[in-house]
């Protein structure tokens, strides 16, 4: 692998997760993102109570993301070989935490909309 291109990264992700699961994850992420944008536009403000609960859920998302990647790659935390592996796992944890926080905020806003009028 000489060049790091988008096609190379897509091939690697499809190899790790399988073509169907990878594209299903991409579609789910796109739907959640669109729902989040819809909620932000609809409400025109951020509900700080919902935002706090979403932030408190971030460790769950971080742990779930790392666990999911370790499961899919048939790896263990003992297989971490160096600083690059730690950086990659931290990146996965951050992405999982942020993604789960967006999911929690969006779900709260869709299923418990603000009752007060601005």
Image (tube, rainbow, N blue to C red):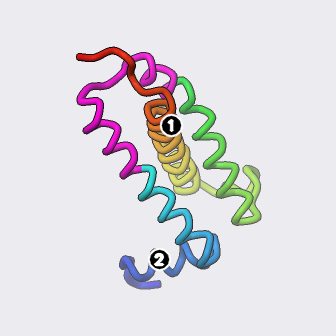
Residue 64 drawn above or below residue 74? above
Give the Cα separation between the discs numbered 2 and 1. 29 Å
Viewport quadrant of the C terminus: top left
Expressed as whole percent of the image width and height from the top left, the position of residue 93 reads 55, 44
Residue 109's place in the image compared with 67, above or below, is above
Question: Residue 89 versus residue 106: which sits nearer the camera?
Answer: 106
Q: In the shown orientation, is residue 68 left or right of residue 108?
A: right
State the image coordinates of residue 61 (x, y, percent, origin top left).
Answer: 59, 40
Name the main secondary structure of what is drawn in magenta. Answer: helix
- Which quarter of the figure has residue 2? bottom left
Say whether disc 2 or disc 1 marks the residue closer to the N-terminus. 2
Residue pointed to by mark 2: 10
**Which residue is under mark 1?**
107
Helix, strand or loop under label 1: helix
Please state which of residues 49 and 114 is positioned toward the viewer in this rendering. 114
Pick whichever, 27 or 2, lies toward us.
Answer: 27
Tell me the magenta residue range.
33-55
Q: How many numbered tags mark residues here?
A: 2
The residue carrying pointer 1 sits among few (fewer than 14), some (14 to 19) or many (20 or more) residues within 10 Å by Cα, namely some
């Amino acid at each position: 692998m000489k060049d790091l291109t988008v096609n190379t990264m897509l091939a690697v992700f499809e190899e790790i997760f399988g073509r169907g699961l990878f594209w299903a994850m991409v579609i789910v992420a796109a739907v959640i993102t669109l729902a989040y944008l819809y909620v932000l536009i609809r409400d025109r403000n951020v509900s700080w109570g919902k935002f706090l609960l979403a932030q408190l859920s971030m460790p769950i998302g971080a742990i779930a993301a790392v666990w999911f990647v370790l499961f899919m790659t048939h790896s263990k935390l003992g297989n971490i070989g160096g600083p690059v592996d730690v950086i990659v796992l931290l990146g996965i944890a951050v992405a999982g935490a942020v993604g789960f926080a967006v999911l929690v905020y969006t779900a709260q806003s869709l299923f418990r909309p603000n009752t007060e009028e601005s």
